[in-house]
Image (tube, rainbow, N blue to C red):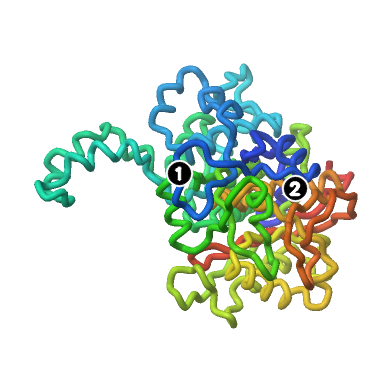
Amino acid sequence: MTTSDRRVVVSGLGPITAAGVGIECLWQAACDGVSAISRIDRFDATGFRSQHAGTLAADAFKVRDSVPKSYRKATKVMARDIELAVGAAAAAIADAGLLTKPDEPVDGPTIPANRMGCHIGAGLIAADVDELTLALTKSVDAEGRFDYGLWGEQGMGHLTPLWLLKYLPNMLACHVTIIHDCQGPSNTITCAESSATLSIGESMRAIQRGGADACLSGGCDSKVNPMALLRQQFAERIAETTDDESAMKAIRPYADDADGSLAGEGGGILVVEALESVQKRGGRAYAEIAGFGAAQSSCPDTVGARFADDDPGVANAIERAIENAGLTPADIDAIVPFGSGIRAMDDADRRAMTSVFGDRLASIPMMLPIPFFGCCGAGTGAIAMAMAAKAIESQRLPARVNHGEVEGLDAAAAPSREADLGAVVVFTTSLGGQTAAVVLTRVGEEDS
């Protein structure tokens, strides 16, 4: 067997969402049809178009519980995005049944450190407003205007010496690799909502070429803070909500009256591993990562909020993933699209899916994570991948809480139900025009 023939599977799931930490929390909420969207309580969201988002309850996750005692001081320089990645990685490793450095295994880690890689997608980490306030107040002139000279002379001095280390996108992978001693191929991908899916594709290829036997892969992001929420509102991506009832109906992917999405925090880390490695250690394979594809779309607005109507990028990514898996569109049993409720993005999704699947599209069931957990930026693809992998293992479609009537797509509200899922395509479009797609397939009993 050559390295290019290596089969790659998902052997551990570590989603972290508003429903909680771990695959069981996500899957229970998704099958019960219970949205985790709630009112924002971390800051005063008055004045924003929406005061609701997908946030973890304060007692649902504490990053100190996910690191060894010797590493707890480092949590002081972790922005929320980093905390989420560290927690998700711990959950994925536990789910996969791996032992890593924090477990102090007598016989060494389950997978040698130099054979464990790490690829984590990250977003544009928003600085904490309270941390910036004092520094900014010391940087204004007598007339109350911001002065760059004063910022350099005295404003910056009111930031902690390690302040910048909290907000570098590569620090998600940095902390995870240090904690778990991942010495194999490592990278950070920052391509907005497509980041996690692209990272999983990179892990797949690193394992196929023999550079690693397993990788911690995915992405995490937090859009639930004043600066990140403001960016989303300026980009016209946030739906309007007035109360809890309107929030439950706010995210309506592919509906004619879709108004936008709601912010979320979370994402996930998956253990992506060579099938032969899983078999050797007696592990579990949720699904095989059979194909991967990526493409860049043309965006006339240059920002990526709207794709060109005739742009083939999204369809190209999906087609490449299916072809890479050695399948045809007729073999796909379910789709996990971006499905955000943002009209321009939904339109791009629909055009691409129609191009790839044609008349069959209306009969292919969809899984829609965002109405459950909010749009988690760079973590979105990891949540979608975790949901798809669990669905394949369970041979069950989760419920949908889409409150819009959808013409021409199997995307309206529906209960959870059993399904024959042999191949599922997951794809994420993004602010910026990048699209990534992955095909997951069922692992045969002979390979388990």
Vertical side of 67 occupied by 16: above or below: below
- On residue 225, the disc is 1
Front-most of residues 72 and 215 = 72
Residue 350 image point, x, y percent: 68, 72
Left or right, 416 with respect to 243, comes to right
Question: Is residue 373 in view from this perspective?
Answer: yes
Which type of secondary structure does the marked residue at label 2 adopt?
Answer: helix
Q: Considering the image in quadrants, where does the C terminus appear?
A: top right
Closer to the camera in the image, 215 or 194: 194
Residue 364 placement (x, y as % from top left): 82, 65
**In the image, 148: left or right of 52?**
left
- Inspect the image, locate mark 1, and give the three-letter code of the amino acid beneath it: Asn
Say few, some or many: other residues with alpha carbon within 10 Å of mark 1 (under 14 / 14 to 19 / 20 or more). many
Using a 10 Å C-alpha cutoff, classify the residue at mark 2 as few (fewer than 14 neighbours), some (14 to 19) or many (20 or more). many
Q: Which label is found at residue 389?
A: 2
* Three-letter code for the amino acid on which mark 2 is drawn: Ala
Residue farthest toward the bottom in the current orientation of the protein: 310
Q: 319 or 50, which lies in front? A: 50
The span from disc 1 to disc 2 (Cα, nearest Å) is 30 Å
Query: Which residue is depicted at the point 58% across and 29% down?
Result: 61
Residue 112, given in percent of the width and then of the height, sits at 59, 32
**Residue 202 in sight here:** no
- View extreme (left): residue: 142
Residue 15: % across, % down: 64, 40
Q: Which residue is depicted at the point 77% across and 53% down? A: 400
Question: Could you say whether the residue bearing mark 1 is in a helix, strand or loop?
Answer: loop
372 shown above or below 299 = above
